[in-house]
Image (cartoon, grey):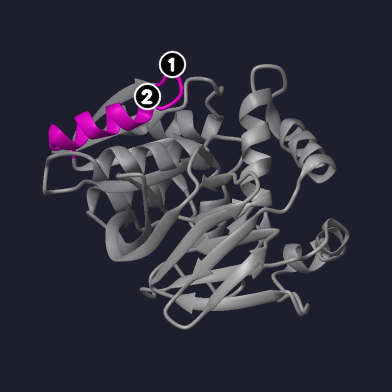
Amino acid sequence: MVRVAFIINGSKKMTVHVQEILKLCEEHPDIEATQFQTKKSKEAIEIAKSCTNQNFDVIVSAGGDGTMNEVLNGILDSNNEIKPVLAILQNGTGNDFVKSAKLKSNISDFINAILENRSIKIDIGRIESNGQTHYFLNISDTGFGGNVIEILDKQRKYVGGKISYSISILRAFIGFRKPTLSIKTDDFQFQGKVLMVAICNGSVFGNGLIINPYAKINDGILNITYLGNVSIIDYIMNFRKLKKGLPILHPEVHYLETKSIEIKRIKGKVSSEMDGEYLAIEDQVISIVKGGIKILDV
C-alpha cells in the first residue's frame, strides 16, 4: 500500500485535472490517499512536516510555486531521515518550476509513477540568513524580482490571479530603486548597484521568463544571472529574449556558475524571494544541495 498525502492550496479552486487524479488515488486499492487543504499562508509547511514524520511515501503539492516551496521546506524541516517523494500538480497562478523541470501530469502516468515508485533526484538551493535556513527548488532572487513579490504579497487580499502579478510588476517598475550589494562567489566579486541577482536551480521564473537559459535541476551547480546597473528600460527591451530563453547581451549582465554565493546589503532597501515566496532577509549565503530531494518522475 502506497501512502499518499495531497496538500492542496485551499484558496484556489481545484482544477478538473487535479480532482480526477485525487479521485482515482482515493479509489485505487493499492493507494491510501489523504487530502489536506490549507486555510492560511505557511500552513503547508506544518502539514508537510507532519506527513513526513508520519512516513507518507509521497506528498503531492497541488497549488502554485508557493505551495510547492512550503511543502519542500516542511519535508526538509522534519525529523524523519527518510524523506517522501515530492509530486507536483499545477493548481495555482504561477507554476514556473513545472516549466523548468518539464514536468507533465498525464493522469495515467501520474498514477503509475506513484505505484511504481518512479522518482528522480534533483538539486535544491539552500539559503542561510540570520541563523535560519530556507530551501528552494527553482529560483531565488534579490532585487527587482523580490520587490515584485513583496508588492504582490501586500495586494493579494485586494487583487488575485494573473492580473495581480501584472499589476505588481508595473508598480515595481515605477517605484524600484537599485540597492548597492556586495556579491561574492569562488571566482567572482562585485560591489555596486544591482537591478537583480537570480540564483537559479531551474531556469524559468516570473510567470514564464527564462532568466537563465543554462540552468539544470540536476547538475550540482547554481547558475547565477547577475543584472548590475541595468536600467528598467533595458530590462523591458529584453523581455522578448527572456521569453524565448536567449542570453541577454549587455555589459552589465553576467551569467555565472558556482556552488555557493554570498550576498550582502551595502546600501538601500533589499527585497528577496524564493519560488515566488517573499523573504524578509538581507545578508545571505546560498548554496546547492546536490540530489537533495526526490520528485515524482512524470
166 lies above or below 222: above
The answer to whether one can see residue 161 in this image is yes
For image coordinates 80% across by 40% down, the residue present is: 175
Disc 1/disc 2 C-alpha distance (Å): 7 Å
Looking at this view, is 286 or 167 the one in front?
286
Instruction: Answer whether residue 165 is magenta in the image.
Output: no
Q: Residues within 10 Å of mark 2 (few under 14, many from 20)?
A: some
Q: Quadrant of residue 1?
A: top left
**Residue of label 1:** 39
- Are the residues at dot 1 and dot 2 in contact (C-beta closer than 8 Å)? yes
126 lies above or below 45: below
The location of residue 183, given as percent across then percent down, is 53, 67
Stretch in magenta: 38-56
For image coordinates 41% across by 74% down, the residue present is: 221
The location of residue 79, given as percent across then percent down, is 13, 40
The location of residue 72, given as percent across then percent down, is 34, 44
For image coordinates 60% across by 42% down, the residue present is: 94
The answer to whether one can see residue 23 in this image is no
Q: In which quarter of the image is residue 48?
A: top left
- In what element is the residue under mark 2? helix
For image coordinates 68% across by 24% down, the residue present is: 155
Q: In which quarter of the image is the C terminus?
A: bottom left
**Residue of label 2:** 43
Give the residue type at disc 1. Answer: Lys
- In what element is the residue under mark 1? loop
Instruction: Answer whether residue 55 is magenta in the image.
Output: yes
